[in-house]
Amino acid sequence: MLSIVYSAGLIGVDGFIVTVECNSQDKMPRFEIIGLPGQAIKESKERMISAIENLGLPFPDNAITVNLAPADRKKEGSSFDLAMTIGIMQSNRQLPGSLDLSKCCFIGELSMTGVLRGVKGVLCMALAARDAGFTEIFVPEENAEEAAVVDGVNVYGVKDLLTLCRHLCGKAAITPTRFDRNKFAAEVTDFPFDISEVKGQEKIKRALEIAAAGGHNLLMIGPPGTGKSMLAKRIPTILPSLTFEEALETSKIHSIVGNLCDGISIVTARPFRSPHHTMSAPSLVGGGSNPRPGEISLAHNGVLFLDELPEFNKAVTESLRQPLEDGKVTITRTLHKVTYPCSFMLVAAMNPCKCGYYGHPTRECTCSRDEIRNYLSKISGPLLDRMDIQVEVTSLSFEQLSQPGKSETSAVVRDRVTRARLFARARCEAAHAADPEISLIHKNADMTSRHFDAFCKLDEQATDLLRAAFDKLQLSARGYDRILRVARTIADLDSSVDIKAMHIAEAIQLRSLDRKYFN
């Protein structure tokens, strides 16, 4: 008897439907799985045999062939166990042949006792199932909250194979798992840090606010102990809250790597990734024989912090150049290629030299000129050109450190940042309504030439100031664009429709530091 059930697989951040065809014939016993199964699927035979026998049923003593279609696409992972087991049981009449499973999608790994174990990427697969017209999705209990984020389908968290069989036969129904979107909207992230805890550094805090408002890349240069890492860790506390659409997009990536399996249904806070400088390029951008997202994709809609930037392998930092421009990364392999989104804020911190005290007002630098030059040359010009804001973090005096009281809290700064983004969003939506060729963007750092023409009109005074800076700083075309982007963000913080000379002046000040250290 032939039975057909459905499951789902993964390719990149997208799921795809897999048709599981199970054929059972009265021939010499054998058990084959075809359709380009990966190693984990080939090993599922013993799990399925043991799970069925632990139901008190004999495993069919005949010829069984399981085909995973489409047969020309590689299937990886253990998430097909449940669908193949249901198909085998139905094809051997251990489940009623009259069961209509055409609108059901089965996802999950089976243990040898019949208990379902959680799998990675359930959110992506549930979205694919919903979009393909399935109305009922069966997943392990561990993944039920995650899959329930997808609206328009009934998600059932299944404890074990016996519970599922009783549900399918109408003997004991499983209660669907529901996700309350209002709970997501009302959830307030409790950050362990606050920007008010940072003493002094008001100019740097202003730079951080501008960077957060526009999603701009930021480079901090300064001697050890000045608070560069401390400031970077507090950037997520001043970023606007994730919208539900952004949270869903971010959660899909974290679902693939298994970050949502511990009772987390959806990512509610903007990611903050801080990898060690010994990491490899594939760890950063993604890769592997079966490509998985790297740190830049895990930082999507959030912050990627690279501390001690020159200590990273140059091949690693250079691999950031294209993703920073495109907001996505494509990984190509022989059989297929995958694309992962990676729209993130790059925040980097570094010392001005190997000992850390080049240019320090009181401490003597012990590095030679060649050592300083070699250390700074680890940061290439093209990468430096992509850092919209470059600031020097200076040492604090005793009076500044010992001054009582706190500065503005993260909540106060975050309110200003949110208002600036809403101001920019309203401008972009109005322009898009008038001219659909002007695309909608989430932040000023994503502006293209069409946005510059529409949003960055300068008066004569601002134009003269920018022209002088262009000639004196020898800016590239990208550097010119970056200054305009930052100036547009500063104007948004002031709720100003026009970019004024004072906005251009502040943007130039936040851009000229590379000439002190790198020229």
Image: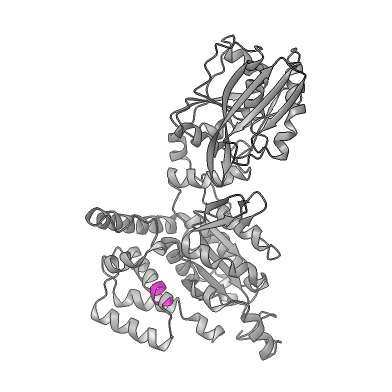
Count of marks placed on residues: 0
Position in image of residue 401 (x %, y %): 58, 71
Residue that protrudes farthest toward the left in the picture: 434
Residue 135 versus residue 388: which sits nearer the camera?
135
Q: Residue at x 67, y 29 (%)?
A: 81
Of residues 104 and 179, the one nearer the viewer is: 104
Instruction: Tell me residue 473's x, y (percent).
Output: 43, 85
The way the protein has been coloured in the rendering is: one colour
Q: Position of residue 466 (x, y in %)?
A: 34, 81
Q: Residue furthest bottom?
A: 369
Which range is magenta?
A: 479-483
Please identify the quadrant where the C terminus is shown. Answer: bottom right
Q: Is residue 382 above or below residue 61?
A: below
Please name whichever residue, 231 or 395, is drawn nearer the observer in this view of the structure: 231
Task: Name the image quarter holding residue 418.
Answer: bottom left
Q: Main SS of the magenta segment?
A: helix
Quarter of the rendering containing residue 45:
top right
**Viewed as shown, does residue 53 lie left or right of 500?**
right
Looking at the image, which residue sits at the far top? 171
- Give the vertical position of 41 relative to 292 (above or below): above
> Would residue 517 be counted in the magenta stretch?
no
Quarter of the image containing the N terminus? top right
Residue 385 in view: yes
Q: Is residue 167 left or right of residue 130?
A: right
Image point (52%, 81%), residue name: 514
Residue at (24% x, 77% y) in the render: 459
Q: Nearer the viewer, residue 494 or 304?
A: 304
Say which residue appears at 22% left-offset and 56% top-offset.
Answer: 434
Counting from the top left corner in percent of width and height, residue 104 is at: 53, 23
Residue 473 falls left or right of residue 282? left
Q: Is residue 180 visible?
A: no
